[in-house]
Image (tube, rainbow, N blue to C red):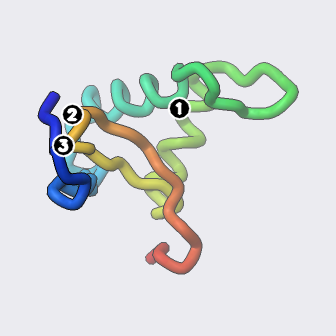
Amino acid sequence: MAQWPDEDERPPPVPVPHTELSAEALQGVVEAFVLREGTEYGARDVPLEQKVAQVMRQLERGEARILFDPATESIDVVVVPQRQRR
């Protein structure tokens, strides 16, 4: 992982269109996201398949997006603010 002495030099996260990933890669990204410790879906237990389907729908509707962070070489799914949605 690269280090930047000045935070201003750190490259910004890069949006990754979910439509540009293979089905297998997209499934892996979304599964890794929903399996992360701290991902909370409320008081009831929700099956993995249902969690993945919810995130997939959010990606399709433009409510969430995938970002690649070159500084940490990691990928994340983030909520898109209402004003930035299509």
Q: Position of residue 16 (x, y in %)?
A: 25, 51
| Real-space Cα separation, disc 3 to disc 2, in angstroms | 5 Å
Q: Amino acid at mark 3?
A: Pro
Q: Quadrant of the C terminus?
A: bottom left
Earlier sequence position, callout 1 versus callout 3: 1
Q: Which residue is mark 1?
A: 52
- Seen from the viewer's position, the closer of residues 42 and 56 is 42
> Is the residue 83 above or below the residue 76 in the image?
below
Examine the image and state in which quarter residue 60 appears. bottom left
Q: Which residue is mark 3?
A: 70
Number of the label disc, if any, that sits on residue 44: none
User: Residue sitting at 86 percent across and 28 percent down?
Assistant: 43
Q: Residues within 10 Å of mark 1 (few under 14, many from 20)?
A: many
Q: Position of residue 82 (x, y in %)?
A: 58, 73
Residue depth check, mark 1 versus mark 3: number of the one nearer the observer = 3
Earlier sequence position, callout 1 versus callout 2: 1
Element assignment for label 3: loop
User: Residue sitting at 53 percent across and 55 percent down?
Assistant: 79
Number of the label disc, if any, that sits on residue 73: 2
